[in-house]
Amino acid sequence: MGDQAFVYERMYPLARFLYETMPNYEVAGYALFAVIFLLSAFVYKLGFAKKLSIGKNAVIALFLLIGGLGLTFLALFLPVVEGLVIAALILILYKIRLWREKRENAASQ
């Protein structure tokens, strides 16, 4: 049990929470992968997405899945999920500010 406590102490909060609360480690790994994939897709949509064809969107989703797999391994001991949350918050604030500026410019013209 000492090794398990040692590993849990080094994990970042969300990964530790998932691994402590899920029924087994396999489900926790898939849950962490799902969180990372969804946050990556959300950050992509907020910051970089353009109108693309379905095929191009499928290729981007495939690369997000592949990249999410690598990030899942890093997320155990690095703040990957926390960084994605912060990136999403910053992009949300940027989008809100951009929307307000467009609305004010439209109202002044």
Image (spheres, rainbow, N blue to C red):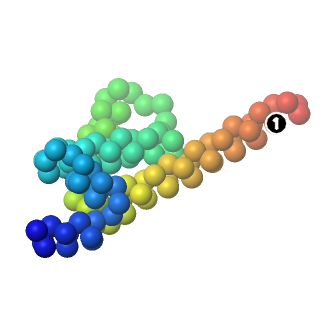
Query: Farthest top residue?
Result: 54
Q: Which residue appears at 35% of the width and 33% of the height?
A: 57
Taking the image as shown, residue 62 lies to the left or right of residue 56, namely left
Q: Which residue appears at 39% of the width and 45% of the height?
A: 39
Q: What secondary structure is found at the residue carrying circle 1?
A: helix
Q: Position of residue 38 (x, y in %)?
A: 36, 41
Relative depth, front residue between 105 and 13? 13
Relative depth, front residue between 47 and 52? 47
Q: Position of residue 104 (x, y in %)?
A: 81, 36
Quarter of the image where one finds residue 13 = bottom left
Q: Quadrant of the N terminus?
A: bottom left
Taking the image as shown, residue 109 lies to the left or right of residue 73, namely right
Q: Which residue appears at 28% of the width and 42% of the height?
A: 34
| Badge count | 1
Which amino acid type is shown beneath numbered disc 1?
Asn
Q: Position of residue 58 (x, y in %)?
A: 30, 33
**Does residue 63 appear anywhere in the picture?**
no
Q: Position of residue 25 (x, y in %)?
A: 14, 51
Query: Farthest right residue?
Result: 108
Q: Quadrant of the C terminus?
A: top right
Q: Which residue is mark 1?
A: 105
Taking the image as shown, residue 29 lies to the left or right of residue 35, namely left
Relative depth, front residue between 84 and 5? 5
Q: Which residue appears at 46% of the width and 52% of the height?
A: 85
Taking the image as shown, residue 11 lies to the left or right of residue 100, namely left
Quarter of the image where one finds residue 54 = top left
Mark 1 surroundings: few (<14), some (14-19) or many (≥20) residues within 10 A = few
